[in-house]
Every structure is written in C-alpha cells, then in structure tokens.
Amino acid sequence: MWKRWYTIIQGCNLPDEITMEEADFISRWLVITRACVFSMTLISGIIGGLLALAAGPINWWYWLLAVIGIILAHAANNMINDYFDYRNGTDESDDYPRGLYSPHPIRSGWLSPTKLMNAILIVNLLDLIIAIYLAVQVGWQIFLFALVGLFISVFYVAKPIQLKHKGLGELGVFLIWGPLMIGGTYFVVSGGAMPTWVLAASIPYGLSVTTVLIGKHIDKLKPDARNGVKTLPVLLGEEQSLFLNKLLFIAFHIIVIILVLTQTLGFWVLLSLLAIPKLVRETWPKYSEPRPAEKPENYPVWPLWFVSWAFRYNRRAGGLFILGLILNLIIPVA
C-alpha cells in the first residue's frame, strides 16, 4: 500500500498493475487531488515557518495548521481547475494533455461533476475552519491571505475572469506560492507580524514554482492555442517561453545572492547554488533540445515534458534553500 502511494506521489498516476477499479480510497484521492505536486506547497510552508523561526519564537501548532491549510488549498485548487476546465470544454477532447498524463476525475469516470464539486466544497470548508481558528488566535488579516488565494484559485479558470486564458495564470501562481503562502505562514506562526523583508525572501521560491507552471503550459501550448486558452507560452511562443524559463532558473539564484548580500537572509541559503550543477547537467539541456517524438521508457507523465524537468529542479533548489535556512538557525554566520 505504501509503495502504491509513493508511486502516485512520484508520478501522478496509479502503478501500471493497478486499475482504477482496484485502487483504494487514499490512492484515488491522491490521484484526484494531484498530490504529486504538493511538495511545492510543503516547501513554501516550511520556508515561511523557518523565516519566522529565525526572527524569534513561533507557535509550532499554528505552523502545523498553516501547512495543512495551504496543502488543502492546493488540493482544492487542483480540483477546481479540473471542474471548471471540464465545464468550459477545455478538458473534453481526447487528445488534451490533462487526460493523458493522469486520470481526469470526471473524464475517467471516478467522479461525477456534482461529486467533484462536493469534494471541493468539503475541502474549502475544512480550510475555512482552520482559517477561522487562526484568525481568532492571531488576527483577522489571515482572511486576506485566504481570500486572495481563493480568488486566484477559482478565477484562474472560472468565468468571467479566467486568469489562465489571459496570460495571467503564471502571475497568480507566483503570488500564491510566494508572498501568499510563505508570507501567510510567517504571519500565522509569528503571531501576526508581516515585515516587508519576508515578502522579498518569498520571491525566489515563488519564481521557481512559476517555472513549473510555465513548463506545463509550454507542453500544452498547441492544444491551448487551439482552444483559445491564452497562457503566457501561447502569447509568447514556445521558443521565447523556453528562454523565459531559463532566465527564471537563473533569477532564482541571483535573487538569493542579493538577499544574502543585503543581509536579508543568512549566509547558508547560498547552499541553493549547489542546485546549479543539476541545472547545467539536466534541466538546461532539456530546455535547449526538442522534446522526444515518443514517450521515453518508464516516463510517468507523458505527453508532458518540460514541466517535469522544471519540477525536478524546483525540488532540488527548494530543498537546498530550506537546508540553508535550517543551518542559518543552527550555525549562524555573522
């Protein structure tokens, strides 16, 4: 069972030997909520808490609740995207990538539209309970973080705004996984503080998550353009979008260096520079070559391609960034 769940978290799909009918309850919901990408949210929550811990005592219980809350919000976001993209007709075609790299909750027959909406409401209700508790304990401003995040999540795909369709989805993701999640977690665990330097410290990882979405939208560029979904890569074109992601990979490290030089963050976050060899050996070459014509052997999320390498780099850079924050606490360098 644990191996099955691990496989899903690693590749967004059930193991090949397990059919949808044979899947257990947890496996189904790990796939439906796309838990394979929750690591990005977990990293944002950890960063927010560690930044607060560096500034003074924190409430560990609030930190746990904050991380649970943003992971639930991420799950709701993924289901909202699937629900509205299906309702809007984006996910209806058989060749659209969403239903190819992982089972679509509705198209796969796992859930009806009504049941998926019920799941969205339940998850958001749980988040509301957490938000109310933390607002009572810490401050009403928590609702600002929650409501802005919910607004971006819903209107990322929902009419009449549809941020994704106007080339604004990438900006929305940067704001959620950067200032909102990292800054919001800091606000909660610090007891209501929100210094501007925290927002600056949230920029590198927010950009890193944005590269993941841009990679995904590059993978879906042609079908999105056909469906009138004007993501940033559709507006820029593939070549310019690949170049943009390369710039953002570099920007992550440049901004980290600036944050250290300005003493916004401690010396040890420079450990994130150790992700550069992975960038040079793996990610950069993939963004400099055409994608394979056919599915590579043992590749789990085909036909997606560029998103995978951005995601792998995101985990390496984000993990080293966290390690640096921890070492700043243990072995501070003046």
Image (cartoon, rainbow, N blue to C red):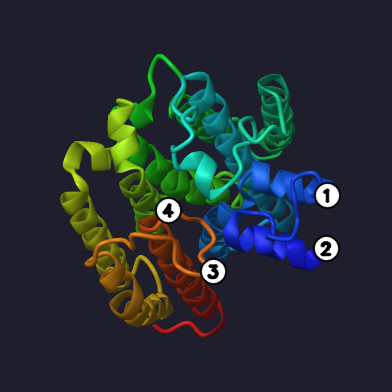
User: Which element is circle 4 on?
Assistant: loop
Quadrant where the C terminus lies?
A: bottom left
Q: Earlier in the sequence, mark 3 or mark 4?
A: 3
Q: Which residue is mark 3?
A: 298
Compared with 266, 149 (above or below) is: above
Q: Residue furthest front?
A: 294
Compared with 318, 165 (above or below) is: above
Amino acid carrying label 3: it is Asn
Q: Earlier in the sequence, mark 2 or mark 3?
A: 2
Compared with 215, 153 (above or below) is: above
Tag 1 and tag 4, C-beta contact below 8 Å: no
Q: Earlier in the sequence, mark 1 or mark 4?
A: 1
Please state the horizontal and vertical placement of residue 8, each as a whole percent of the image.
Answer: 66, 58
In the image: residue 38, left or right of residue 180: right
> Residue sitting at 60 percent across and 34 percent down?
79
Q: Residues within 10 Å of mark 4 (few under 14, many from 20)?
A: many
Tag 1 and tag 2, C-beta contact below 8 Å: yes
Q: Nearer the viewer, mark 3 or mark 4?
A: 3
User: Which element is circle 2 on?
Assistant: loop
Q: Which residue is mark 2?
A: 1
Q: Is residue 193 visible?
A: no
**Which of the pair 308/304 is nearer the observer?**
304
Q: Tag on residue 79?
A: none
Q: Which residue is mark 1?
A: 24
> Residue sitting at 76 percent across and 68 percent down?
3
Q: Earlier in the sequence, mark 1 or mark 3?
A: 1
Amino acid carrying label 2: it is Met
